Image (cartoon, rainbow, N blue to C red):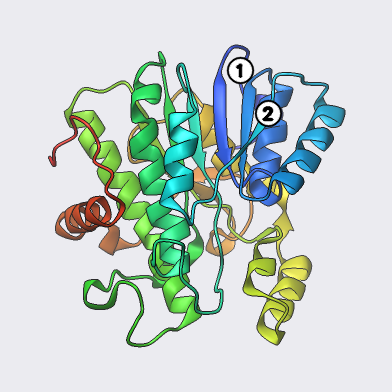
Amino acid sequence: MNGFRAESMPDQTGRRVVITGANSGLGFQASLAFAAKGASVTLACRNPERGEAALAQLRETTGSTRCDVRPLDLGSLDSIRSFAAGWSGPLDVLINNAGLMATARARTADGFEQQLGINHLGHFALSGLLLPALRSAATARVVVVSSLAHKRGAIDFDDLMSQSRYRRWRAYSQSKIANLYFAMEFGRRLQAHHDSVVVAAAHPGLANTNLPASMGRNSMGIATGVFMRLMAQPGQWGVLPVLYAAAAAEVSNGDFYGPNGPGETRGEVTMVAPAARVADLLVARRLWDVSEQLTGVAFVDLPPV
């Protein structure tokens, strides 16, 4: 894996890719990389104007005419269902990238705590609804983007929506470990079903993206943004584990990729280990069941292992 760059990706001509949160940050970097390799990329964006601006920049940079923008608000199950219903044909790659970080207390349109609702439940629902399209592709891949913050995370089933006490970083870490429980359980179920779809996870280390902007224009958000600009690696490097998970031939269900530098904060792409608690199959299955109940989305023909 050492030496992997966006240019190392194999040709993607003919492949269809959906990237959530693709108008900026890691999502936009991933869109550039796939478009440059010939893929048809759909930028799934909450803000249509920002999505169109990103698409124009992508076309100017790569010369691609195969890409488009479609509205997707991961904080709304209606929007997620509309996006999935509007998709036709096979889907080769789904990158679950969009997210919020350490935001003030808020609820999604469906009443979920905002960070868990968007970072985990929205992507859970989207993946389930797009599973038929993924299965109709020859070799489909799902990539779930997590964070180093998952190492501090735990699933609080007694207060999943942080109603009793809201702490923004705790809620963020819970949503990021939820990403990994989901990715690992999804992969196990697919493998047991002898399915051709492969699910992997990735994290960017410390990457200088616009994610701190989601915290708001408060002192914490400003300070985090300054820290990231000074200490983090550029987004072009942070996206490499995501691209590897999405496009490398040797990726298997349950793989988790990140940087190989100190504390996994920066460096070359390598396989990394999630926090030990992610291996708890009972928590993974319970979170899956709760996520199905909350979203109303069931994954067809994927019973628990």
Q: Is residue 284 left or right of residue 167?
A: left
Disc 1 is placed on an element classified as: loop
The quarter holding residue 32 reads: top right
Number of other residues with Cα within 10 Å of mark 2, as a class: few under 14, some 14 to 19, many 20 or more: some
Q: How crowded is mark 1: few (under 14 residues within 10 Å), some or many (20 or more)?
A: some
Residue 273 can be seen, yes or no: no
Q: As rendered, which of 1 and 135 lies closer to the eye? A: 135
Secondary structure under the numbered disc 2 in the rendered image:
strand
Which sits earlier in the primary sequence, circle 2 or circle 1? 1
Q: Residue at x 34, y 24 (%)?
A: 132
Q: Nearer the viewer, residue 261 or 94?
A: 94
Residues 5 and 109: in front is 109
In which quadrant is the N terminus drawn? top right
Given the image, on which type of amino acid does mark 2 rest?
Answer: Asp
Residue 195 appears in the picture as rendered: yes
Q: Is residue 243 above or below residue 247?
A: below
Q: Which of marks 2 and 1 is in front?
A: 2
Q: Which residue is drawn at 37% across and 16% down?
A: 136
Which x, y percent locates residue 235?
Answer: 71, 50
Q: Vertical placement of 269 versus 87: above or below? A: below
Q: Which mark is residue 68?
A: 2
Q: Identify the residue shown where x is 64% and y is 20%.
A: 39
Please state the total of marks drawn on the protein image: 2
At a point 42% along the width and 23% down the height, the residue shown is: 140
The kind of residue on which mark 1 rests is Gln
| Disc sitting over residue 12 in the figure | 1
Is there a contact, CB below 8 Å, between mark 2 and mark 1? no
- Image coordinates of residue 101 in percent, x first then y, are 56, 67
Dividing the picture into quadrants, the one containing residue 28 is top right
Percent from the top left, x then y, of residue 287? 24, 58
